[in-house]
Each structure stands twice: as C-alpha cells, then as structure tokens.
Amino acid sequence: MFKQLAVVNGDNVNRYGYRFTIGALEDSMFQKSLTGVPSLLGHDSHKPIGWNFPLGLYFEPHSTRLVALYLLTDTDEDQEYINRVYQNELIRRNQELCKPFLDEFSKLLSPYTNDTGHYIYCGCVSYHEKGILYRLYPELHTLKDKDGLVYLDQLLESFEYLGQGIFKCKKSEIAIFCHSFFRRNLSRHNNFHYHFLDQFIRLNDTPDITLRVALDDDLIGYSSTFNEQIELEYWWGPKYNDNIDEIPLGVTHYECDKGQRTFSGVSGTQFWWKGDEESMILELEELKDNPTLGVSAEMYGCRYIHSIYLKDTFYFDHFDGAVRMYEEDQMLQRLEQPINKAGKNTDYTKLFRIDGKLSISTWKSLTTHYFQDNPLLYEYFGHKEEYRKLRENFDIPLQTKGVVESLVPYKLKREEGIRLFVSYHKPSPVTLDFERTIINPDTITSKNGKIDIIEFDALEVKKALNRLGEDLTIPDGLALIKCHDAYINYPTILHSPNNVEENLGLTLQAYYLLLKSICKRADKYVSFTLAWPFEDKEAKLSIYGHVAEIVEWLKVNQHIPLKHSDFRVWLENQNKWLSGRYSCQSNKPDLFELVNGDGVIYVKRRSINPDWVQDITNDENGLKYKLEIPEDNRDLLEAIQKNDIHLAFSTIVSKARCGKTSGDYFTSTTSKYLDNDVYVVLEECSLAGAFWTDKP
C-alpha cells in the first residue's frame, strides 16, 4: 500500500459555508482512529481505492485541521484486498445503521412485503424490494405520465420534501425516494446528486413552471432515520453569461483528459445545437468507456438532457433529463459517432421534466448540477480556467520553498508560535512495570545495521523528573544520539494507567522546570510528546516550538483532563490560546514536514549526501572535513556563503561524564541545564552522519 498524509477537514468555514467545531473534528477522529474508513474515488462506493485513518488534530494559530493517514492501493493484490474489506464494511455499516430500527420499521412494511427484499441504508434506513413503492402507494402509479414521471405539485399534496431526494409521507413515517439514476454512478449505494435535486424541488414555488420527476419504484425508507449527507467535494453553479443566441449550431465534442476520466468516469461529452428563427434545441449526452457499476458490469449509463430555448422570450420553455443505457457493443459504436448520427436505439429512462419559463441562468445551473462530476460542462460554458483554479485550490496553500526551507522544513521563528498535534492510537504493547517509559524511538541505519535511538538530551527529562521525586524508564538497548544543532527531539513518554492524571501533571512540571532552565542558557527549538491511556485508546500530545514559547504554554497547561468531555473543552482552549497569542501563519512550517505517520511531531533532519563530505578527521582541534558540492547546486552554494544554512554532525554517545563531579553522566543526578557550573564531557562517540541546519 502507498501511504500518504492528507488534511481531510478543518475548523475554518469551508466553501459550502460549513464550519466544523474542534469537538466535532475530535469526535470523528476518536470514533474512527483505530478502524479507519474506506477511501472512495469521487465518493463512489463502487470505486474503493484504499483506507484512511483519522490520525490527529493539528493546531496552529487561527486554524485546527484533521489529518488522516491514507493507505492507497498500489498493486492488483492491494486492490483485491481492499475490495474484499470494503464489501465487509458495507455489510457491517448497513447492519449498524439499520438494526436498531428494524422492529418498528418492519411493522410498517409487513402488510406490503413478500420477503424477497433486503434492508439498506440510503440516506435513511430503507427497504429494497421490486415494486414496493406502489404496493404501499398505488395511487402514485396513477399519477405517472407516459414517461413514468410524477407531477411534483401532486406528489407534494401527500408528501413533504425532507431534502436530498427523499420525501416523507404526511400521514406516516414512510419515506419515498427520487429515482436511483439521480445517484452517483446510478447506484443506491451512493448519495444522490442532491445539489441538482434540491434546486429542482425549490423551483416548485416558481410561477409559470411545471415540474415532473421519476421516483424509485423499488425503495421505501423510514423517515425518522433521515440524516442529511455531506460530501465535501466542491461543485458549484458558476455565473454563466446569457449569450445563448451566439452559440453556433451543430455538434461539439469535448474529451476528458486522463485525470478527469479517472475521477469522473466520463470519457467525453457531446453538445448538439439545432434550431430555426424561433427556437434553439440542445441535446447533450456524456459518453463513457467504463461500465456503470451501479447497474451492471456490462452496461454503460450515460446522462442526457434535451432543452428548447425560445429566442423571443429569452427563456427555456422545456428541459428534460434522462439516462441512456448502452450494452458494451452499443457503447463502442456510440463512441465512434457524433450525437446527431447516433440514433436513439438505447434503453431510455427519463428522470425529470421542466415546462414553462425557465431562465437561462437557472437552466445552466441545473445542467451543471445534473452532470455533477463531469468537468466538461464548465469547459463548454466558458469556465474551464475557473474550474482548473478551483481544483488546484487546496485547503493548504502550495508554497514555493527555497533551499533553506527545503533542507530545514521545520524552520520556525519564535514569534510564529508553537504547534500542537493530538492523536489517538491502539494502546502500546508495553509489558514492563513502569510509571513512565519511552516508546517509539527513532531508528537510524549504520554499518552495523539498524539502531534504535533517542536524543542525548532525553537524559535531562529523567533528571528533571528525579528532582520532583519521579522517574522515567529508559528501555535497554537504546542508543543516545547527539545532534549538534539548536533543535531537540525529546522522546515520546508513555504514562501507565496508574495515577495517570497526576503523573501527567508531574511530567508537565518537569518539562516546565527543564525548559525554563534551557531558556536562560540557549536559544533552542524543541519537540516533545506525551502519551497516556484514554478510554480504549492511547492518546498522544505533541508540542513543537521555541523553548521560550513552550514555557509560556506550560505556565497555563500544568493539567490535562482525562474525562472525555473535559478534554474536548481543553482542546478548544488550545485553539483559543494559540489564536489569541500569535498571528495566522498559513501552514508555516508545512505540517506534513512536522507530523510523522506515527502521530507525533518530530523534527526530521535532512541528511547530507555522504559523497559530498570528504576527508573527515578528528583531533585535539576538533572535527575537520572537506565539503564538495556539485556546481549545479547554485542555490545551496549561495545559501552556504550567506551563512543561511550549515553542515552539522550527529554522533552516537557511548560514554559521557559530568565535567563538575567526573561521575557517569548517564546515571548521575547532575544536569547541564538544571545546575550551575555543570557541563558534559563526551568521552566515547562515533560519527552517525551529517545533516543540514539553519541553527548550528
């Protein structure tokens, strides 16, 4: 599987006008952090492409974002596995959503079913069985016109519109549905294209307009379980101009590029304008070269519209939409022909009809929404560039990085504040008896193989805890690495379930004691992570920033609540504290450079090409080397000349002593930060590597 971190949501107002609270973001993360959710291409249940796990909440000034870890299929074997897992998830989800309501729902249905159907969640708890609609409501059958459409005003005499293609009976809790071909990929497993349907239904209050719509004959719902669905895929109705008269007659064909075709399932779209002095008629059909899996693996369902525009009134007086269904050989023939030569020898299902005075702008908006996911409508109506910019306008702005930002991507100024990351995980499999222990060390590769490491300054956390009468277990076998720059990664400290709230507070006190002392001695940037049992999970809190700013944060955060509701309030307060203290930084530094896949913030130093570092020697005058950088790295050479970036070394420390007491620094109680006149003598070290830094 291919792994990728991505932002899936945030607490800022999105394009639809929604704003998710931090509590709502935390809840979605908590519910699915261990099980994850399927990743579907274009929200299509027939196109699972992987799995994603809500990883954590990333806090920066004026913004909190939910980050997910995506596992995406990379091979045929991956895809087969995901298909199996997803089918099981569909079954589980339907059972979970439907089971609590089956007793009461089945009582409403029992006189009308023949027990050949099944329950399914389709925006509400639903029952699918052929012809079930007309067994409950035979009068609806009499309302159908010759195309199988029902007049909307007559339908609304007995039903009220709940939204998103679903109606509720005014006399019972039964819900009925618009035709399944209004759904993505024409499938009941997918949501409706509800932007079209909601706009269509609203037109019922418009004078001089008559609406007709197709219903789903084979589906009945339980209205009290209706929930509005939210698909955070931005699709909008642009403000088109009204120059219909200027459109030339004839057939125009637009073709999707590879990326558009993969995402939309559409290969092309054909527009056929014809007319005379009084009117212009449009037939528009999209084409597909992949089957419509919501119907069959052998059938190709292509959306189609027919419209009549009256030149003297500047209105469309007729507009209808349908799906043309092709078998494979028919589809191959259709792809080779323009729409005016293709004929109409297909299985044709009409879905809606509008008669009356329909404005040009409303017609264009409805057309765009009806063909949701088809990007060629924007191109045809003259909004190709607007659509392109929209697709490239990600929530996180793309930044052009200079050489320093590329090689030191965690660079952060003190005034830019601190960053927090909160995540939930499966509990760590720790077997030893402990109050606090280090977990998830980093790993480096040496000539002797892989080595688990923690940074040398982890000893200082243990010493600070000792000053408070507490301790930190450092597991055997961990090497200590000293990175000679102004950044420190303190390790992840896991707290045992015993007295966890008190022990967390003491760890925060120890960090406050330690970092306050560092402030007086050095200009450092640090990251540290706390972990603790949290209900059935393990919570992790990571912090990164200038040591002085973290000290300010620690002054007001000496206690982390363990009650879930209180913890959510605490998270809301973190957002307020950051936003009240610092200005907006717009993802600076890039969160993907700070957040690791294991759910912690960790400074990931960039190694230098070992071929560039030559003739390394170490004598009484210190470490000497020759740096040979190829001339084509001009930006890097210029940054080095300006002292914007430097080479630094990391060393594995095997033996160190206290310069004041001569005792073993690994086990002594003295601290280079907490005590005066204490320094460390590194007696046995081995070179681990070289890396780039802006703060040597």
Image (cartoon, rainbow, N blue to C red):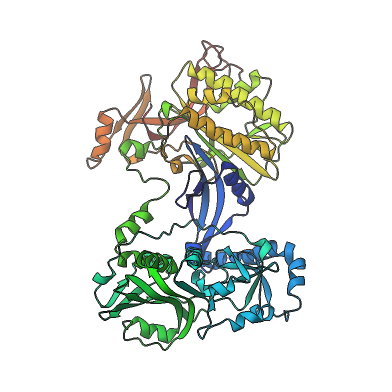
Give the camera-side residue of 410 and 374: 374
Residue 532 percent across, percent down from the top left: 66, 37
Q: Is residue 581 above or below residue 354?
A: above
Q: Is residue 631 visible?
A: yes
Residue at the image point whose x is 35% and y is 43% from the top: 399
Q: Is residue 477 visible?
A: no
Q: Position of residue 333 (x, y in %)?
A: 36, 85
Residue 326 higher or lower than 235, as above or below: below
Seen in the image, is 639 located left or right of residue 485? Answer: left
Q: Position of residue 457 (x, y in %)?
A: 53, 26
Residue 686 vertical position relative to residue 12 in the rendered view, above or below: above
Q: Nearer the viewer, residue 75 or 234?
A: 234
Q: Is residue 454 above or below residue 426?
A: above
Q: Residue at horizontal 43%, vertical 70%?
A: 265
State the image quarter where residue 87 is shown.
bottom right
Q: Of residues 212 and 107, which is closer to you in this image?
A: 212
